[in-house]
């Protein structure tokens, strides 16, 4: 399990470096010119108060000593906001990372709401970031970085990047474990986005990675599983929106091999895709009024609307499932189907939270609350409200009761599911 914790961090955030990177002094770049136009001066642009939400999905095969152990789909959700803009055009940002993983063979399509990690950093116009070592997210850093001068189609350049892994829980390493690489860039082409009509610049990025870690002075049960050699290859295509000064979307093919000091070898290969997603500020008077009036119009006494820092939540109390199962009864499906029509009016991600009454063991309460939240999430996905990658679930057992667990009426109220339309 210790090895597994390390492995997840190695790969899960591989793709997130396109959006947040670590500070690095300018590395010498090589430019080769092959076209005759004036070229494009690529630059990041920041405006105070701007916010964005990036959703990245990874399809991955995991091998241990050459044997396939499992296939997984990983979702990485990044929300960020620009908190300050400086005279040189750099921007200070605050970003939150949330990662969820599910097995391809796992029943159902829901993604659990994972741990959240905050990073605060400053990024300059070229793409280089300054971030303190107290922050471990993301893993891939200094990608992309642009030259100081205009670039023409067919031109190439090289900048140093690195990966930074969080090994605090596994090996008590209190700073990011860093693996360097040289990224090779090519300005390949221009493409017009069919949906927006904007011109996007296609940037191709490729890098190989090989790093040998210093050998521990003595082997113990802890450090024998430290990474001895980290190697791999990444090929990425970035569709860059220079008018907005940001990435529009990208894809990647990767293969990472890690060999620990015991001689065991772990291989991760797959593809990744990410894009900046449309969101709407949910916790406004207008939206809360709109949702509350729509819910009230349904005529259900046990459905209410509330707000908090997360967003706007629709709470369904006394929700009914088949006996000893997480299958919704027919009447509840009809209720959720009507709520689904309201949810379709907002583009933001959804968080489905399950609760239960304080009966039975805590372990069983947790399991039931998770399964019932997943049942609602899967049904919303089936209704076409959102794709599975945009619906997250969590179970909170009997925590946060809204009524007394000493009466049947109170326990019924505590058996509830909450659907949160997430801000950002």
Image: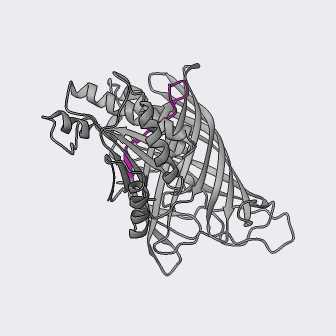
From this view, report whether residue 146 is shown above or below residue 302.
Answer: below
Question: Left of 357 or right of it: where is 155?
Answer: right
**Residue at image coords 48%, 61%:** 23
Magenta span main SS:
loop
> Number of labelled discs?
0
Q: Position of residue 306 (x, y in %)?
A: 32, 56
* Of 19 and 410, the residue lying toward us: 410
User: Where is the N terminus found, in terms of image quarters?
Assistant: top left
* Of 322 and 365, the residue lying toward us: 322
From this view, report whether residue 19 is shown above or below residue 59.
Answer: below
Which portion, as a residue range, is magenta?
Answer: 103-117
Question: Left of 89 or right of it: where is 393?
Answer: left
**Residue at image coords 38%, 59%:** 292
Residue 359 visible somewhere in the drawing? yes
In magenta segment, residue 120: no
**Residue at image coords 52%, 38%:** 74
Question: Left of 52 or right of it: where is 404?
Answer: left
- The colour scheme used here is one colour
Q: Which of the 4 quarters of the picture holds residue 38?
A: bottom right
Residue found farthest to the left: 406
Q: Position of residue 249 (x, y in %)?
A: 64, 55
In magenta segment, residue 107: yes
Q: Position of residue 76 (x, y in %)?
A: 50, 45
Question: Left of 149 or right of it: where is 129?
Answer: left
Q: Position of residue 116 (x, y in %)?
A: 38, 48
Q: Which of the 4 quarters of the picture holds residue 285?
A: bottom left
Residue 214 visible somewhere in the drawing? no
Residue found farthest to the right: 36
Residue found farthest to the bottom: 87
């Amino acid at each position: 399990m210790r090895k597994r914790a390390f492995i997840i961090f190695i790969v899960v955030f591989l793709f997130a470096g396109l959006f947040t990177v670590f500070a690095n002094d300018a590395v010498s770049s090589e430019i080769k010119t092959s076209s005759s136009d004036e070229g494009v001066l690529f630059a990041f642009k920041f405006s105070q108060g701007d916010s964005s939400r990036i959703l990245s999905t990874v399809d991955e095969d995991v091998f241990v000593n050459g044997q396939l152990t499992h296939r997984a789909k990983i979702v990485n959700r990044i929300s960020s906001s620009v908190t300050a803009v400086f005279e040189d055009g750099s921007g200070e940002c605050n970003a939150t990372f949330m990662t969820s993983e599910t097995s391809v063979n796992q029943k159902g399509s829901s993604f659990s709401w994972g741990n959240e990690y905050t990073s605060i950093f400053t990024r300059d116009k070229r793409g280089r970031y300054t971030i303190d070592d107290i922050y471990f997210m993301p893993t891939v850093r200094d990608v992309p970085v642009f030259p100081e001068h205009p670039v023409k189609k067919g031109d190439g350049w090289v900048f140093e990047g690195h990966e930074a892994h969080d090994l605090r829980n596994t090996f008590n390493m209190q700073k990011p474990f860093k693996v360097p690489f040289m990224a090779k860039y090519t300005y390949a082409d221009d493409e017009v986005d069919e949906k927006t009509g904007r011109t996007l610049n296609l940037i191709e990025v490729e890098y190989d990675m090989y790093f040998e870690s210093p050998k521990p002075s003595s082997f113990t049960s802890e450090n024998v599983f430290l990474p001895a050699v980290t190697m791999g290859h990444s090929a990425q295509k970035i569709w860059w929106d220079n008018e907005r000064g940001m990435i529009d979307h990208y894809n990647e093919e990767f293969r990472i091999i890690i060999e620990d000091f015991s001689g065991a070898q772990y291989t991760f290969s797959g593809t990744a895709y990410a894009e900046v997603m449309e969101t709407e500020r949910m916790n406004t008077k207008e939206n809360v009024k709109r949702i509350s009036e729509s819910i009230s119009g349904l005529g259900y006494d046990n459905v209410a609307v509330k707000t908090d820092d997360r967003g706007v939540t629709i709470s369904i109390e006394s929700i009914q499932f088949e006996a000893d199962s997480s299958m919704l009864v027919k009447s509840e499906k009809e209720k959720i189907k009507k709520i689904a029509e309201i949810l379709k009016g907002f583009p933001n991600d959804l968080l489905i939270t399950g609760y239960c009454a304080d009966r039975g063991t805590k372990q069983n309460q947790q399991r039931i609350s998770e399964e019932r939240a997943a049942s609602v999430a899967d049904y919303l996905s089936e209704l076409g409200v959102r794709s599975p990658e945009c619906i997250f679930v969590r179970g909170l057992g009997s925590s946060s009761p809204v009524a007394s667990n000493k009466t049947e009426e109170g326990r019924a109220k505590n058996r509830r599911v909450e659907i949160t339309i997430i801000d950002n």
